[in-house]
Amino acid sequence: MCGIVGWIGPAEGPAPAAAVRTAARAIGHRGPDGHGFFEARSVDGRTRVLLAHARLAIIDLAGGAQPMEAPDGTAIAFNGEIYNFPELRAQLVTSGERFTTNSDTEVILRGWRNWGETTPKWLRGMFAFALWQPSDGSLFLVRDRFGKKPLFLARCAGGLAFASEIKALTCFPGVEAEIDEDGVALYLAYRFVPGPTTMYRNISKLAPGNALIWKNGEERRWRWYAPPDGQPPDQLPFEGDPIRIALRHLREAVRIRLISDVPVGAFLSGGLDSSAIVALMAETSSLPVRTFSVGFEEAAFSELPYARTVAKAFGCEHSELVLSARDLPQLWEQATHFRDAPVSEPADIPILELSRIAARAVKVVLTGEGSDEIFGGYPKHFVESHVGHYQMLPRWLRRGVIEPLAHRLPYRFHRIQTLFAGLGTADFNERMARWFGAFSADTLKDVTNLPLRLLSDQPEPGNTPLRSILYFDQTVWLPDNLLERGDRMTMAAGLEARNPFMDHVLANFASALPDDCRVRGTWTKWLLRKAMEDILPKAILQRPKVGFRLPVERWFRGDMRDYVVAMLDDPDAKSRAFLKPAGVRGLLEQHLSARRNHEKAIWALLALEIFLRKQSEPAAGVMPPSLVDAA
């Protein structure tokens, strides 16, 4: 796991070598164990390439330094982990390749000679890498199937610059940190910015499962992987016992993610997903599993008792962190610095501080991201299957009776209000924004001057509602929110996060199953629950979906009230360039008086304001000490 930076462009004229080095230092938190720089020209002398690398040493501590160069001059800068590299290495040795290291990086480098542009399809893991070929002066850039590892792009000095984080790209000459109104509009619709857009006008994301070749100033892109849930299901009956096969695949996904030359632990929330991972780690490990959990002073929002139950059941060496409203403002600013975007969700912030705790003891953690998006774990996955039935009801009943009644419910029933708002939205793209976002289309008109921006993807004809929303989750919600959050917050602490549920073999298997193996009746993640039935404590298996929630509703009306008002009702607020003060004030008044629950909306607006203030500051220097360091 690392940070990569680079540039490719014409050999004539100045090349941004100093900028590449500065950019690598800007993301040095991603790789505190080593730094490397590579510069070369193509055989014909027309093209120049610069590569830089900040290394977090996990595999082959002595021999895995990067950028790595092959005898023929081919070079790679790689961020990620390839879990099947031992098998690929053995295959390549058989074909005549000779290795000088024990690293997964060299497996990609040598594999390229055999597989070329199909190399990503051979890799089981998470990755973003740049591979330079001096023979034809081309640079190959690629991102893994689900977008677990980031890659950002910008045009610079007649060529193409790329990096693991946006803050690195803003070190390049001519790449200004200019806010993109389209990015702000998408953020307000979804609470995060779906790719390829970012919050910056001249910086974009390479999409998950995509590759790019830059050669002689020309670019070619293609999609090499798409999650199979995007297509209608195969009509052939599934053969075998899905419960037994699911457990076998999950065990394998956990086992290969324990490959490491440094200590490995796990984030443990006490929910089904992280508990399943810890249980399967304990089956494999000869030592107690190191687990790390975060909770809150408000007992109703703290999952620490459940985490302790799991840790005790599997003999874990357990560590805990407790946060309060007093901690939030300082950590929020730090999380914004590392995210290079508004912090989409409250959970980002405790994950940042939990990563710092974990990094004291381990260099790698396994986490539960992706389980809900692969196995169907959210309430919306159940509800989406009934949208068609609801919309068959007479319009007068839906719009004249049911939805007005839901809207008038007390604020504590805001989840029911969201449910009926989603059910009543016929357009697929608008409904996806409703499930994820903080505002309805009508509320946005009251809050912002910007036009509503929605994605334009539509479900494949003949696909099921469950598969369609899971595909949206896997291609938008996951890479641009949850996985981006996970990468930035863990790497901020120099910690590698691995996601067994995002294993593409496991995901492909789940997609081949009938829908009722994932959502059965009102039970979400039915298959995962059945697979873990004889392994996890019943108290964990029978817990309803909770999610990683912070008590921000109470905090905004209590300890953080003055902070919220000072930030959002400030005449000099940076966000007023995009927002209507009267509309923002109306939201605040309704929430602070406990008439409505606008916690998601207020969070989204606060996150935007904090981001715009941080973005307008001079180049970020040393971050304030964390709570961990101050303890």
Image (tube, rainbow, N blue to C red):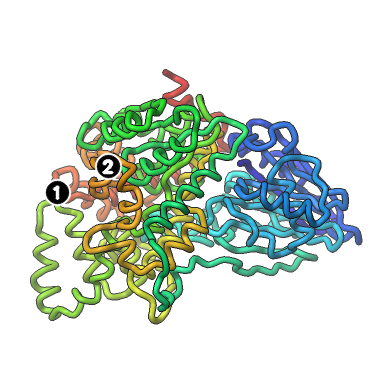
Q: Quadrant of the C terminus?
A: top left
For the residue marked with disc 2, what is the amino acid?
Answer: Ile
What is the x, y in percent for residue 268? 38, 37
Per the rendering, the mark at residue 257 is none
Which of the two discs, 1 and 2, labels the residue nearer the N terminus?
A: 1
- Residue 507 horizontal/vertical position (percent): 46, 59
Bin the neighbour count of mark 2 within 10 Å (Cα to Cα): few under 14, some 14-19, many 20 and up: many
Left or right for 49, reference 156: right
Q: Say which of 216 and 177 sits in front.
A: 216
Q: Secondary structure at mark 2?
A: helix
Q: Residue at x 56, y 37 (%)?
A: 618
Amino acid on which the number 1 mark rests in the picture: Arg
Quarter assignment of residue 425: bottom left
- Given the current orientation, which residue lies at the most extreme top position? 631
In the depicted structure, whether residue 293 falls above or below residue 392: above
Specify whether 47 is left or right of 479: right
Residue 5 on image: x %, y %: 68, 47
Name the residue tied to disc 2.
Answer: 540
Residue 21 in view (yes/no): yes
The residue positioned 32% from the left and 41% from the top of the image is 536
Indicate whether 241 appears above or below 230.
above
- Looking at the image, residue 352 lies above or below residue 189: above
- 553 vs 281, left or right, is left
- Quarter of the picture containing the N terminus is top right
Q: Residue at x 38, y 28 (%)?
A: 315
Along the line of sight, which residue is nearer the eye, 527 or 525?
Answer: 527
Name the disc covering residue 412, or none: 1
Residue toward you, 365 or 37: 365
User: Which of the two residues, 599 or 530, is positioned nearer the viewer here?
Assistant: 530
